[in-house]
Amino acid sequence: MIKNGFVSSASIISNAPKFRYALSSLPKDKRSCIGVHLNLTDHSPLTKNKDLKPLLNAEGHFCQNIKTKTIYLNKDTQSAIFQEWSAQIERVLKYNRQISHIDSHEHVHTFPSLFVVLKKLQIKYGIRRIRTCRNIYPISTQEMRVLSKTKKLFWHYALKMFPPVKITDGFTDFLTFYDRAKIDSTLIRYNTVELMTHPGNKNYKKENDLLKTNWRDDMPFETTLINFNQL
């Protein structure tokens, strides 16, 4: 998808079984903008820290059924997560690939309890571009409550400023943006929007088929495709 110009940035799960194959398939020129998809909910951790135990199942793998939001993360667990995420970043750096940005599997980096860990990671590795939280929803979705919207705005601002990073104004999935943009001209207020896609995933056939079309011609406003390095 990147080679054909359909996708401008990609992120990679460095503790996944096919990590090296996935990394080798990404071009090493300016078309390839690679981020690290921080992970706490799938596959085995790269580190063997006992304080990760609350996040692991009986086999020692990150457990999808364990929701980090509902677990009390004490200082030891937060430190273990910092070490694990550092290892996930360093595995990409080991292969001499420049890291353009940070995002995460199942959006765990947006959990308030991990904000300090995320910021420590940003400072340690000098990564200045991070995915924001989802703030564009389908038209059919009930409007967010004022409290939820306020929390998201606060997190977005804190992420951007302390210390500074470059983030997009909006974030949503590709199909939601495509469907909503055709009937909602207010989306033009976002100068930049990250559109999340899942190229090659059979569960996202409609999304993948649309990606290969001239979908931008259907937009009621002018669009330009950029990558994270261009923020």
Image (cartoon, rainbow, N blue to C red):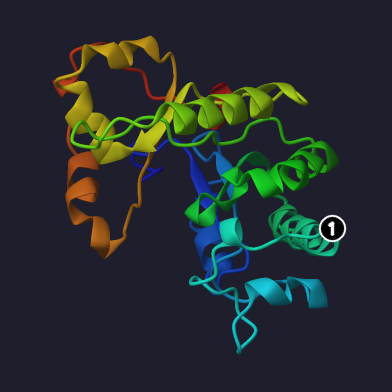
Q: Tell me the residue at 58%/43% (across/down).
A: 110
* Residue 194 in view: no
Q: Which residue is the site of mark 1?
A: 75
Judge from the rendering whether residue 195 lies leftward or rightward of residue 17; answer left or right.
left
Quarter residue 2 falls in: top left
Vertically, is 151 above or below 85? above
Q: Is residue 88 visible?
A: yes
Closest to the observer, 29 or 88 = 88
Lateral position of residue 174 relative to residue 2, left or right: left
In percent of width and height, residue 32 lies at 52, 41
**Quarter of the view holding residue 182:** top left
Which residue appears farthest toward the bottom when viewing the image?
59
Residue 230 x, y percent position in the rendering: 55, 22
Drawn side of residue 195 relative to residue 165, left or right: left
The residue under the point 58% across, 27% down is 156
| Local secondary structure at mark 1 | helix
Screen quadrant of the C terminus: top right
Judge by depth and name the residue closer to the eye, 85 or 91.
Answer: 85
Residue 30: x and y in percent read 55, 33
Position of 145 relative to 86 (above/below) = above
Classify mark 1: residues with Cα within 10 Å, few (<14), some (14-19) or many (20+): few
Which amino acid does the dot numbered 1 rest on?
Answer: Lys
Instruction: Pick the residue in front: 24 or 101.
Output: 101
150 is higher (above) or lower (below) than 140: above
- Picture layout, residue 37 above or below residue 212: below
| Count of numbered circles on the image | 1
150 left or right of 6? right
- Please name the residue shown 61% across and 63% down the image: 40
Q: Position of residue 108 (x, y in %)?
A: 57, 52
